[in-house]
Amino acid sequence: MGHHGDCIFCGIVSGALPCFKVCEDDRTLAFMDLFPVAEGHTLIIPKRHATDLFGMDSETLSAVSATSLRVAAAIRATLAPDGLGVFQLNGAAAGQTVFHYHMHLLPRNEGVPFALHSRVRGDDDALRRTAERLAGALP
Ligand SMILES: [Zn+2]
């Protein structure tokens, strides 16, 4: 799958690093952001390393989109947020912090200030429970 040096997301794909997985298929993996901005904050990545959008191909991008549809439905079914943000950042100047393409699915609720990254690591048990709830609600 093309493990790229110190890339933590490649480490997650290879199983060398743990994650709270929501789902996976041949091309993609969805898991909880360890520094969640909101409950249900999920990342979707291609299994094959691409630094950012410019390293992606349309088939892989379509696979990420298809996974995002499933996870979005699960978020709505379980957490019922007021809204759902879909974000994807390319390059440090755009705010990208992990240089393996990833799409954020970020539940949004009225009155909560916007942020995309948090410095506070999520609680493992809470992340695990949310991942299980989402996995159980996938269409
Ligand atoms: Zn990677």
Image (cartoon, rainbow, N blue to C red):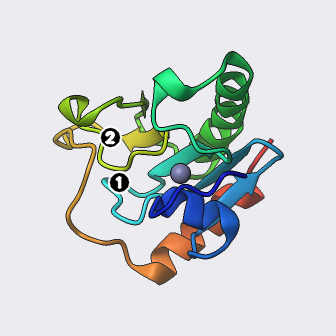
In percent of width and height, residue 110 lies at 26, 36
In percent of width and height, residue 56 lies at 59, 26
Q: Is residue 137 above or below residue 86?
A: below
Q: Is mark 1 within 8 Å of ligand 1?
A: no
Q: Quadrant of residue 130?
A: bottom right
Comparing 122 with 2, the one in front is 2
Q: Is residue 135 visible?
A: yes
Amino acid type assigned to the residue bearing label 2 in the image: Asn
Estimate how packed mark 2 is, as few (under 14), some (14 to 19) or many (20 or more) residues with alpha carbons within 10 Å.
some
Query: CA separation, marks 1 and 2?
Result: 9 Å
Q: Quadrant of residue 49?
A: top right
Amino acid type assigned to the residue bearing label 1 in the image: Ala
Q: Is residue 45 above or below residue 54?
A: below
Q: Work out which quarter of the rendered image holds the C terminus and state it.
A: top right
Give me the residue at 39% from left, 79% from top. Answer: 123
Q: Is residue 107 above or below residue 40?
A: above
Residue receiving disc 2: 109
Comparing 102 with 116, the one in front is 102
Give me the residue at 49% from left, 41% from top. Answer: 102
Q: Please tell me whether mark 1 or mark 2 is closer to you in this view.
A: 1
Q: Are marks 1 and 2 in contact (CB under 8 Å)?
A: yes
Residue receiving disc 1: 38
Give me the residue at 48% from left, 22% from top. Answer: 54
Give me the residue at 61% from left, 76% from top. Answer: 16
